[in-house]
Each structure stands twice: as structure tokens, then as C-alpha cells.
Amino acid sequence: MAYNKVHSMDLALPLWFEVGSLVILTLILVADLLIIIKRPHIPSMKEATGWVTFYIGLALVFAALMFVFAGGESAGQFVAGWLTEYSLSIDNLFVFVLLMSQFKVPKKYQQEVLMVGIILALVLRGIFILLGAQLIQNFSWIFYIFGAFLVYTAYKQAFAGGDEDENHEPAIVRLVRKRMEIAPHFDGAKIRTVFEGRKVWTPMIIVFIAIGFTDLIFAIDSIPAIFGITQSPFIVFTANIFALMGLRQLYFLLGGLLDKLAYLHLGIAFILAFIGAKLFFHAMHVNEVPFINGGQPVLWAPEISTWTSLAVIVGAMTVATVASLVFRKQDA
């Protein structure tokens, strides 16, 4: 594949850097989890802002290290991938806010729910990254599938998002309610409790299942999107880790503001559609499908650079945010 050969020179990261990065990031996530277990609380605006700023700064430091050890192309791919996944993670927060409200999760225990959601998201995305990398390596036509899926997702995001019933439960949650005996009230963060002399499940198990199902849907959406920016599994995985870091604190920081970002979903839809088109063009460059150009690469198809992708992603999110704030001001 010509595309991969062109970029492979700029993606040769030292093994110690890759292993060391994954070890350090794992330790940070474990420390974050231990903080929640030992001190469950509702973070203040100051605390949440500090943690979100720290994680964003950490991602930028990592990008700078990528620039030093692997060059500008790799650093640009990481930043573009991180911003894409971050924007999708913010979209994920909309669903988390609805779930917490729908299941009436006590605010004190929402951090535990969010951390479980983040761990599930990392596991699911890790699985999809491995599958996606294998598919890309062995089947170049998968780029056409990924591209079409992202364009379809963008359409749903832009035009069907507002029609969903906020109180509609996934089918798997309804099935669990029928098959499992659920206590009427939470018992802290426990998933099992004693009710009327019997061991039963608490509503927390329903919340965890709903969060897990949501993570699965977002993993299916997000992995093709970032593979449209880079085919390096290391960059894909680290971009996802950094996008999920601080998501718990961001939930408490933006929880009351998310509903005011009226056009955020349109910005995300534009990004997904753009990356879908980019995947189509890349698929044409490495084309092996017999009924397209006789199975030969379509060389006239434009090749969109990493820096162009980065500019489009930043521009789309900026325009969506500014438009939302202007709309909110005019409405007020």
C-alpha cells in the first residue's frame, strides 16, 4: 500500500517509548481509580477544572514527545486523533448525563459509575483497535466500509439525534429488568444487597449494563473515525486513552452546560462525514476491488493530509461551540 509506505518512515517510535508510555498511562488510570474508591465525593468546579487542565496538558506534552521522537507527521496524527476522540467522548457525556438522570444515580456515586464506564470503554476500544488493525492490514477494501459507516453515522448524528426518546431504555436493559430481581433503591455503589431478607441486585447493575452498552456503540463509531486519521495502532490506542482521561471530571465540569451546546452534534457530524470522505479517498488510492477501476488504484483521488484533517477538526468544533454560545445568548 503506497500510503502506508510513505508514512511509515515517520511512525518509527522507539520500543521503550511505546512500552514506557503505556505503563505510565496505566499507572495514572489506576491512581485515578484508587482515588475514587478511597474518597467518593462530588468534585468541586475548581477540582474538576484542575484535573481536566492537567490531562489536556499531559496530552499536549505527549504530542511534543511524539514530535521529538517520531517527527511532525506522527505528532499531527496523534493530535488530530486525540481531538476527534475527545469530541466523540464529549458527545458520549450527553448520554451519560441522560443515564444518570434516568436511573436517578445519587451524585455521590456517579464517579464510580463513570470510572467503570471509562474502563469498559478502554477495554472495548482496545478490542476494536486490534480487530481494526488486522482488517486494515489484510483487507484494504475495509476502508470503503469504514467510510460508508462514518457518513451514515454523521447523517444520524445531524438529522436523527434530536428525535430519540430520552427515556427509552436499550433492549438489553429491559431484558435484564425482566430476568433479574432488582431492589427498588440503591445501596451505595454496591451491585448486590439484601432486600426483604433476600439477596437481590441493586439498580446499579442496570446502570453499569446501560453504560457498557453505550460504550459499545461509541466504540463502534469512534474506532473507524480515528483509523481514518492514522493506521498506527499505538497512536490510535494512546489517542483513545488521552481522550478518556479526565472524562469523569469533565462530566461534573460540563454536566450543566452540555444541553446549552445546541450545535455540538452538528460539529461532530461534520467531522465524521469529513473523515468518512477521507477514508473513501484513501480506499481509492489502495484500491483492490475488481469492479472499481479494474482493481487498480485510483490515482486521481485527492489525498488529504494530516494537517488538513487537524485544521478541519479544530475548525468544526470551534464553529459549533461559538455558534452554540451565540445562539444561547440570542435566545436569552
Image: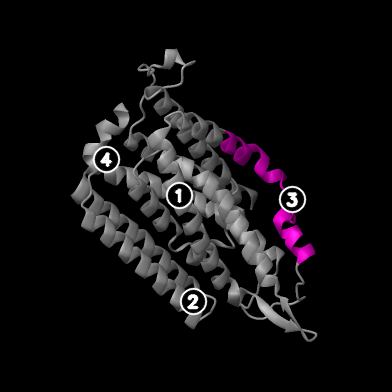
Whichever of labels 2 and 1 marks the residue nearer the N terminus, that label is 2
At numbered mark 2, what does the secondary structure look like: helix, strand or loop? helix
Left or right side of 277 for 26: left
Q: Which mark is residue 36?
A: 2
- The answer to whether mark 4 and mark 1 are in CB contact below 8 A is no
At numbered mark 3, what does the secondary structure look like: helix, strand or loop? loop
Whichever of labels 4 and 3 marks the residue nearer the N terminus, that label is 4
Is 235 inside the magenta-drawn segment? no
* Residue 68: % across, % down: 19, 50
> Most prominent secondary structure in the magenta stretch?
helix
Looking at the image, what colour scheme do you see? one colour
x 48%, y 39%: residue? 271
- Say which amino acid is labelled 4: Glu
The answer for how far apart the CA atoms under marks 3 and 1 are is 25 Å
Whichever of labels 4 and 2 marks the residue nearer the N terminus, that label is 2
* Residue 103: % across, % down: 70, 66
The answer for how far apart the CA atoms under marks 4 and 1 are is 18 Å
Q: Looking at the picture, tell me which residue is in the foreground, 59 or 215.
A: 215
* Residue 28: % across, % down: 37, 69
- Say which amino acid is labelled 1: Glu
Which residue in the protein does label 1 denote? 85
Which residue in the protein does label 3 denote? 165
The magenta stretch is: 152-179
- Say which amino acid is labelled 3: Asp
